[in-house]
Amino acid sequence: MDNGGAIILAVDDSPATLEVISRHLTRAGHVVHTCASVEEAASFLDTTHVDLVITDYKMPKSSGLDLIKYVRENLRDTEIMMVTGYPTIAGAVEAIRDGAGEYLAKPFTGEELLGVVSRILDKQTHRRSAHADHQHLNEYGLLGDCPEMLAVYDLIDKASQTSANVFISGESGTGKELVARAVHYGSDRRASAFVPVNCTAIPDTLLESELFGHVKGAFSGAKESRAGFFEIANGGTIFLDEIGDASPNLQAKLLRVMQSKEFCMVGSSRIRTVDTRIIAATHQDLQQLVKQGLFREDLFYRIHVIEIHLPPLAARGQDILAMVNHFLKKFSQDAGRPAPCLTDEALNSLYQYSWPGNVRELENLIQRLVVIGDGPSIDVTDLPEAMRFSLNRNSFGNKTLAEVEAEHIRHVLAQSRDNKTQAAKILGIDRKTLRGKLKRLGLE
Amino acid sequence: MIAANILLVDDDAQFIDVMKKRLTVRNMEVFHAGSGDEAMQKLAIHGEIEVVILDVKMPDRSGMEMLRVIKQQYPLVEVIMLTGHGTMESAIDGMRLGAADYLMKPCSIEVLVEKVREAVDKKRRHEEKIVDAQVREIVSRRL
């Protein structure tokens, strides 16, 4: 990656070291400033943008560790690395834990210095473009940049880089299949098939044949050999939607193929091997189903390697506006007419609405409004009645943050019928943290 | 209340035995694994594990590979590298990959316990921050 032309500040009480660093880095095309102390460097950083700080460890008055802490607390976008004439494992651990991106022992060659600087600037470039990188997810229909969705995008990117099984949770209509597609098409399996399977839609009698295929003559009516879902998805990804509704028979069959990666087509004794990544999704609390004995624990752990949780639409704040605009544009283009705009009152009603059907409900609503509407704008009177008169959620008045937190936890617990596992999941925390909060807020 | 839920990963059964006893008497719940694969199974089964104490040299997988996989699949789980063969390079690599600490054997139990407590605090602070961010989001939506 080309990272020439960075602005670098070198901090060392040794003029000779500053001279060496400046010479090598200037020759590589960077702009280099120098300071002889931490205090001087802090003043310089207050007024000048710097991409990378290179600091010595031992200096008079304050040490390089103090500068690392200063930079980490005040300049989140600036990288920092440490050079030292007294290298120790403990020193390296401390410097990196405090926020240094690299640690280089003196004396170093020009090549070593340039290598380390290049690595750290590459990392910075990558981080800066991370947000832009998420734009490619739009093509899979994933929209919005609320904090929860940014976390989802990060997980999609991470999951795409591995072949680990993925479990996607979230309410109906939040876009679980879109996430599964984004993981598949972002991975090196993209050239092979993505096969979505709705676990509720397969009757038990056809189960084995649908999953593993059958050979000609395997049963009456089997006039041709037919490949099953797993074979079609060989080298690619199988998406098991609504896995929580899988029958015990289906669960057993899935577990067997996940364990051995082998299966036989119906009517054949030849063992076939598959390399299929499994992405499973459900709107149900799978852990609760395990506890109730309705879902196999061994299968749960097989599929639950990376979990991606999709937030409900009502919790995604301004994302609603981004999605409204996206769907208005999309359906207007389909209809061959200019996109209408929403009045402030109509938009406000959409913000207030609880969206039980999530993104799917919003998409259907906008499609309907575009198809039946004939004016240049959509007003509150054009919206369905439930949205026009939805409850105003702005009822927290002058409550403290703790009171709002307590109230929200109480509300989620009530919604989950006091099921702490489910409530913790909705709140995005683990059970232990929820227990701690219940105790602290006096809700137990 | 348990002070920490720990997964101890080391192929030295005697070391695991001794450390398990020492950590257990300090009110810590200790799971253990003798190989990388076993460690991943334990992490998948025991969602309560907060800190992994990981030997850098394992028979089936390198500690660095393990660290990378753990941080990828369980980003909130803290990992303390513990090794009898420490080098500057592996310490830097480990910390850059997201280890909470890198300790050399022999390491006193007091130091290890302190590092575990720091790692647990870090993890819990991180979780608190996530919750706070969500609450802020909820509050800002309602104001």
Image (tube, coloured by chain):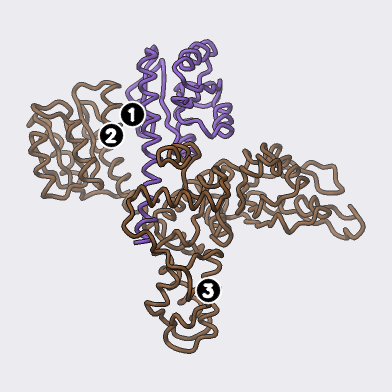
Chain colours: A brown, B purple
**Does residue A244 show up?**
yes
Q: Would you call the spot at circle 2 few (<14 residues within 10 Å), some (14-19), or many (20 or more)?
A: many
Give SS at disc 1.
Answer: helix
Measuring from the top left, give residue A1's x and y in whole percent: 33, 48
Position above or below: A383 against A292? below
For disc 1, the marked residue is: B92
Identify the amino acid type marked 2. Glu
Q: Nearer the viewer, residue A430 or B43?
A: A430
Chain for disc number 2: A
Q: Nearer the viewer, mark 2 or mark 3?
A: 3
Measuring from the top left, give residue A117's x and y in whole percent: 25, 39
Q: Nearer the viewer, mark 1 or mark 3?
A: 3
Measuring from the top left, give residue B41's x and y in whole percent: 59, 31
Position above or below: B102 against B135? above
For disc 3, the marked residue is: A386
Q: Would you call the spot at circle 1 few (<14 residues within 10 Å), some (14-19), or many (20 or more)?
A: many
Q: Which mark is residue A272?
A: none
